[in-house]
């Protein structure tokens, strides 16, 4: 496992909890977000082309902060939320995540969502999709002093789950997620199926890189199994373990190499 902040993380113990980003990781919501942003821009700013692509370069960030970064009116937040809620019926779970959450719950892991959305919007969305009962806690950006990339939201999730940083991993699809995880002392796992550009996400230096949701399972084995170390994956040919590299960009499952 690689990463610039490994000295701040204890990766030797059993994984007891997973913290998930929401948009792009658990739910496919980018199309709705793009349309809601364009409609909010037209309503508040007026004529002209909405800077949708610039908006999409800040996944995982709290909307008021993104508007400020782009020099856009804070008044866009209200119409954006309204339109997002109106179009929420188009949002779907990412393929495989419902099954993933079910398996992790069955293994006894604590599960939390730490999102750039407000807590109310996140819980409403997950509730509408029938996914809210699959997680223990949902923490929104408006429920902590500082949103991502600050570590506050991850620390709050760990507090609610009752685990130490070395007992958790965070799965996110944006550089802000990975920065927040590292600052909180949590292993930063990159989801390549999410909303960020692949190269941008890899350049953020994740500890582990996953190509699809099910690839998280080897990092979170059942209690009492031979290893629960973040950053390692089971070798299907035996019970030995090989490190996962956060610097590679796998097209399939995390690379499993025989140990010499």
Image: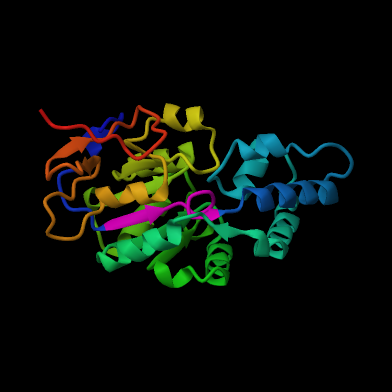
List x then y, in percent, for residue 62: 57, 49
List x then y, in percent, for residue 228: 18, 50
Q: Hey, which quadrant is residue 120 in on the image?
A: bottom right
Q: Count the numbered circles shown.
A: 0
Residue 165 on the magenta span: no
- Camera sees residue 149: no
List x then y, in percent, for residue 218: 26, 49
List x then y, in percent, for residue 28: 57, 53
The residues colored magenta run: 17-27
Q: Nearer the viewer, residue 164 or 219?
A: 219
Q: Is residue 26 left or right of residue 81?
A: left
* Residue found 47% across the figure and 45% down from its top: 148
Q: Nearer the viewer, residue 187 or 76?
A: 187
Position above or below: 136 against 78: below
Q: Hey, which quadrant is residue 16 in on the image?
A: bottom left
* Residue found 55% across the figure and 68% down from its top: 129
The quarter of the picture where the N terminus appears is top left
Q: What residue occupies the far right of the structure in this picture? A: 47
Residue 21 on the magenta span: yes
Q: What residue occupies the far front of the structure in this picture? A: 237
The quarter of the picture where the C terminus appears is top left
Position above or below: 251 against 19: above
Q: Hey, which quadrant is residue 117 in on the image?
A: bottom right
Q: How is the image coloured?
A: rainbow
Q: Is residue 173 left or right of residue 255?
A: right
* Residue found 51% across the figure and 43% down from its top: 194
- Camera sees residue 80: yes
Q: Is residue 98 left or right of residue 68?
A: left
* Residue found 60% across the figure and 35% down from its top: 57
């Amino acid at each position: 496992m690689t990463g610039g902040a490994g000295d701040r993380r204890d990766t030797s113990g059993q994984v007891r909890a997973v913290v998930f980003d929401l948009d792009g990781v658990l739910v496919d919501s980018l199309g709705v977000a793009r349309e809601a942003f364009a409609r909010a821009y037209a309503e508040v700013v007026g004529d002209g082309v909405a800077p949708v692509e610039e908006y999409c370069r800040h996944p995982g960030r709290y909307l008021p902060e993104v508007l400020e970064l782009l020099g856009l009116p804070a008044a866009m937040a209200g119409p954006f939320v309204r339109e997002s809620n109106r179009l929420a019926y188009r949002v779907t779970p990412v393929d495989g995540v419902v099954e993933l959450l079910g398996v992790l719950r069955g293994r006894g892991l604590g599960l939390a969502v730490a999102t750039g959305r407000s807590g109310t919007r996140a819980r409403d969305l997950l509730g509408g999709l029938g996914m809210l009962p699959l997680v223990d806690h949902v923490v929104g950006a408006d429920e902590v002093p500082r949103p991502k990339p600050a570590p506050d939201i991850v620390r709050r999730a760990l507090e609610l789950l009752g685990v130490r940083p070395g007992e958790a991993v965070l799965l996110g699809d944006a550089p802000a997620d990975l920065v927040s995880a590292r600052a909180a002392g949590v292993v930063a796992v990159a989801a390549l199926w999410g909303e960020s550009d692949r190269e941008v996400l890899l350049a953020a230096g994740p500890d582990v890189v996953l190509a699809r949701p099910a690839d998280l399972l080897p990092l979170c084995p059942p209690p009492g199994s031979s290893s629960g170390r973040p950053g390692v994956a089971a070798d299907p040919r035996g019970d030995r373990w090989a490190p996962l590299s956060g610097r590679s960009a796998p097209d399939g499952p995390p690379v499993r190499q025989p140990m010499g």
